[in-house]
Structures are given as C-alpha cells and as structure tokens.
Amino acid sequence: MNRTRTYGLKALLYLLLATITIFELNAQDRFELSLISRSKGKRIPEKTLQISKTDAEITIDGVLDEAVWQTADKAKDFHRQYPTDDTTAFSKTEASITFDDNNLYVGITCYDELEGNYVVESLRRDYMERNNDYVMLVLDPFDDLTNGYAFTVTPLGVQMEGLITGGGGGFMAISSSWDNVWYSKTKKTDEGWTAEIKIPFKSIRYADDISNWNIQFVRNDLKRNERSTWTTVKRQYQPTSLTYSGEMKWEGTPPEAGSNISIIPYVSGSATQADLSSNNNVDWDWNAGFDGKVALSTSMNLDLTLNPDFSTVEVDRQQTNVTRFELFYPERRQFFIENSDLFSDFGFRQSQVFFSRRIGLSSPMIFGARLSGQVGDGLRVGLLNAQTKHQMNDGYDDTPSYNYTVASFKKQVFGRSNISGIFAAKQGINFSKDQDDGYDFGTQNEYNRVYGLQYNLLSADDKWDGSFYYFNSDDPVHTSKHWAHGTSVRYNTRKLMAFWTHEYVAENFNAEMGFFPRTGYITFGPFVTYSFYPKSKTINRHGPNFRSNYYLDTNWEFTDKNTQVGYSISFLNSSRVSVEWENTYVKLFNDFDPTWQFKSGTEPLPAGSEYTWNQMNLNYSSNSRKDFSFTFRGGIGGFYNGNGTNISGTFRYRVKPIFSLAMNYSYNKIDLPDPNPSGSFWLVGPRIDLTFTEKIFWTNFIQYNQQADNVNINSRLQWRFAPVSDLFLVYTENFLPDGMVSKNRGLILKMSYWINL
C-alpha cells in the first residue's frame, strides 16, 4: 500500500479513536443540563404530554369546539427562545394532541393581545419560516433524537412541511422540499388564533412498537419579535433540536398505518422552439408517467418513478462564477427527497460522494426505485436504482445510457452518533468506444464505483458534532491514488463556537456520481466565533470571528490560503451587520480567465503563477419583519494581480400576503493589467410572487446574466387543487441581451394527482 496513503489512514483512525475517547470522557460536560441523565442510560425529558385515543369525529375547521380538546392533556407554559432565553414566553400558547385509528390530530391556541396584523409574507406553501408568524409541530416518531418531521402553519392557514435530519440542530435543520398529504385550518378569534391539524399515519414513517415519541412545539410571533418553545431550548441552538424536545406518551403503542400505497400519475404537453436563429418550427410533444409510494411497513418506504418529468421543478437561481470550480445547486426533485440523508450525507457539503443532481439532467431518466427507512433498533438502510436514456444528436452518440445504484446504511452508536457506509456504482449499458459500432463516448468511463465508511458524531446536548470519512473509488483508468478522507468537528456553546475541518482527496479519486469540484488536494482550517450578550435594548449579540482555509497539493506545497478576521453585530430587531478583512493566496495549476469570457486579445493568468491580495468586506441585513427589507454584501480590494470589486444582495418588498417582489443582484468588476482579461458584469434576478389564495400561486422569475450573455424568463402558474395534486402552466424563454433576440422558448402544461389506494 502507498506509504502516504497508509499514514493518512492511520492518522484518520487515530483521530477517530481520540475523538470517541474524548466524547466518552467528557460525559459530565455533555450531560450538564438537567433534562439529560446517565443514571438509567436514558434521557429524562423536561416535559411529558399524554396522548389519548378519541372515538369522536373531529372536523378540521380551525374551531376547537370538539369535546376532546377540552379534556386532552395540554402542552403549555412555553419558554422564550429568542431574543432571550431566560424567561417564560410573553405570548401564551397551548397545544393538545389526540388520535384515532387513521390520523393524528393537533389543536393549538395562540393567544395574541397585541394590536396589528399578523406577519405573513405570502400565501405560498413552503415559505421561509423565519419571516412569518407560525406555529410548528415537531415529531420524532423513532425516539432516536436524530430524525423527524416538522409541520408548520401560519395564522392565515398556509402550510409548510419538512424533514428533520441530523438531530435538527444544524443551520439547515428542516428540508422543506419534502411534500406529503396532511390537512389544517386556522381561525382568528378574539383572543388570537387557533389551528387544527390532521396528519394521516400513512403520511409519516414511524416505529409502531414503541410507546414514546419525542415532540416539540415552536411558535414564532414576529409582532412581538419572540420565538418560543414548549420545552427549554437555549438560543444558541435551533428550536427544532430534537435533544431538547419533550416526550409524548402513548396509551400502549401507536396504531399501524394499514394499507399504504400512493400513486401520483402525471400527464404533460409542451410546445418548444429551439435555435430560433435558423428556424421557427414548433415542436409539439406530450409525456406521461407516474411516481409511486409503497409503505412496506410503518418505517420502511419504497419510492418508484417511471418516465419522470422534472420540467416544473423550480428554476435554479443563477450564480456569477469568478472561481476556478463548479458551483453547487441543491436538489429539488421529490423522488430524491424523502430519507435523502441516507444517500447524500457522505462527505461534506462541497465534497459529496453521491449528488443526486448527477442523475437525469444531462440524459433523461427512464425509471427509478428507492427503498429507504428503518429496519431495526437504530439501523436505517437505503437502496436506490435509476436508469437513464441513451442520447443521440445529429447521428452522434453524445451521452451513453447509464444505470445508477446506491446502497447505504446508518447504525446509531454512542447515543445519537452513527456509523454509516455507502456503495455507489455507475455502469454504462451497451457501452463501447468502437466508432464502427456507432458509439463514441470520448473519455467517459464505462463504470465508476465509490465505497467507504463514515462516522457521524452528535453529542446528547448538541455541543459536539462532526464527521469522519474514508472513501475509495474504482474505474477502468485509475489504478492508484484513488482514496479520500476527511474530518470535521464542531464545538458549540452559548459564547464559543469552534469548528475544524480537514480533507485529503488523492489525485485519482473519482466520484462521478458525487460533487468534488477538484481532486489532488489536502485542505484544513479552523473557524472560531465568540459571542457577547449585552444587556441592551438594541443589540442582541456581538463578537469577533476568525476563519482560515489552507489547500496543499499532494506534494505538500501550498496552492491556496484564505484568512478572514471579522466582527459581527446582531440587533434585537433582527437586523445584522458585519465587517471583515480577508487575505488570499492562490497558485494556479492551470491557465485561468477569472471573467470566464475568454475574449480575444487577452491572455489568461498562466499556470504556475502565484498571487496574494487583501480585501475588505461589509455585510448588512435589515429588519426582515418590515414590508421592505434588503441585504447587502460588498467587497473591495485586490484580486489576483489587479483589483476587484463585488457587490451583491437582495431587495424585498411585499404587500402581505398576496404580493412579493425579491430583487437579487450581483455586480463584479475585475481590473487586471494588460494583456490579462478585465471586465465587469451584472447578474440581476427579480422574482415576482403572486399568491391569489393558499392554493393558487403565480411566480415570475427573470434573470439577466451578463457573464453568460443571457436573459431568462420563467413564469409558473400553479394550482394545488387537492393535497399534493397540482396543475402547472410554465413558460420559459431565453434571450440574447443585445436587442433581446430570442434564442429558444417553451410552454408546458402538466397535471399530477395523488391517489391513495
């Protein structure tokens, strides 16, 4: 075995063992909160809520007039979580929960004695929760304090549902891309507002052999600028953190969901015009297919898709690229969402072994199947298979047909932590490079496989989290130096947050189904923030921060260095400001044009050249509760061998709750000495949302990308005529900015309908 590889693997194993040892020896510190106990080896919840069965019919109308709501156990005496966490909530909230053979029911009363309208920015589903008044139900139906569901409703009855992974304590605690069937109604009263929620057992996955679930209620009252939780959650943690949730005790065990099969067929028609410079022909087409969900048990689900159509997925927000690497765009397609952590949580955000967007975008997906869920005590498994279509253009084979297979597992250990493993395989079908056979796929590999293990650390009190991975790849070309390993550890308390990361990605590591913008590097660096909480009527928190990233090649020579030192202030009215000094060093390993415009008469920065520069950055976010708000980020200083200026941000204006305008903007000015390339370019993206009702939405997104020399218009009208059933009308067109000459356009009509069998 290669000596460097051996040392790297040993170092990773030693660090893993040391971290586990520290994790165990630090038990007293980790369990310092009163709600955690080691005496019986089980968490002692701060509060407990009894759930009883009802035989009475509950009408979901927002009026809590059924007798069961008067007798059911109540979650009350909420605790303030923001802007301070040292008192009971000023906004009083009460919640009760009951069930019958088929559904879970929740009744919530939100008292409100303040004058003025509620803060609800839109009637659109899946809103940004921090910008709205809402009440949220958080469920952990496996009692593992790791995975769960969030169901949220605003005073105007607008719904948002999401999946909780990783314990619910991360920055992106809720994945709102998940969609499923549930029902809710709200009602304004003289004392505030009430909400009734019905969640079919068929809509969630759960363990039906345990008598305790974990539960949390969260209320956001922007009028009072207060967020509160049923159980105590310190403000440095997310309110959805499952380790701080209360306990819901069943009478026995929850009922089985029964037969649970859902089919979501769709039909679509389109009219497109491509390459308008040479013809005006209209291509008409239609398509049909379906998605299916089969619950094999209350905790295991099989997702199926045949001839999927992703045409109505929300358009990506374009980005200006002045880096040397590929940009990351999130997954939005429903087939890949549920239990997605079983497949995507291998590696780090910018270095993932499996990135589902690699499937079905360059070549159409024909079918897919995905089995995922829990099969035993603390053991979750996932299995995915998808097939793409062979693409031909003008008689030439551009993209071969590939089959994608991913198998993974996660086994809970040491409390909330887990050990996970993955095997990802991409296999060409009828693959040949013999041009006489009609196939010429150039440098594309016939197969690619990646496999490895990962340990995910998550302490019982959310103070410690991190990941440690080791992966290997296999393809027909590379026979050595095809491994990768990495470490990330975070320590988070009220005042101190310290984060460390390292990665070693060998030259020939090749994850074709993943997202690794580059290979052949070693990177490491710390990130530290310290927070002060003054007794002030204007400032909530302030403090310094330090971040540093170092990149070396596999010969241990520096290729990149970046250091940032800054200071940030968060105000009680939700606005924020920060200033930072940044120092950057880059050694280019390829010729590089930072404008990405490759104009004639200019010369790219040459490979092997080295550059060091300084820059000052200013960031500001205004009070997001106001009808008009904005964010601003500005940077000015050096850039490679010249100077650079970048300005970006967003302006938002809304007429609650039917109209909102968000203007995203980005301006980059690059000034390098001749003959190196210079340039300036704008990226402007106004988005206009009209929400006529909670079921009818019209979104218009216009993006002008000067760097790409393109104007894109995307207009999408959506009618949700039944739960998770939609009618879409989507128009898109691309223009050349000069004279607004149309390049291509398309109109799509699509209907999907959720059928429970």
Image (cartoon, helix red, strand yellow):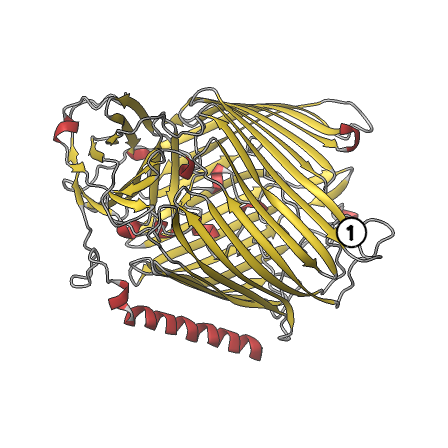
Q: Measured from the top left, where is residue 710 in percent x and y?
A: 72, 36
Tell me the kind of residue under disc 1. Answer: Ser
Is residue 456 at all visible to an observer of this figure? Answer: no
Q: Measured from the top left, where is residue 125 in percent x and y?
A: 43, 30
Is residue 424 at all visible to an observer of this figure? Answer: yes
User: Which of the 4 image quarters holds residue 329?
Assistant: top right
Nearer-the-camera pick, 304 or 330: 330
Give SS at disc 1.
Answer: loop
Q: Measured from the top left, where is residue 411 in percent x and y?
A: 35, 58
596 vs 730: above or below: below
How many C-alpha atoms fall within 10 Å of the one at disc 1: few (<14), some, or many (≥20)? many
User: Which of the 4 image quarters holds residue 394?
Assistant: top right
User: Which of the 4 image quarters holds residue 379?
Assistant: bottom left
Q: Residue at x 27, y 30 (%)?
A: 112
Describe residue 588's horizontal placement relative to residue 254 as left or right: right
Q: Mark 1 highlights which residue?
A: 678
Q: Residue at x 27, y 66 (%)?
A: 29
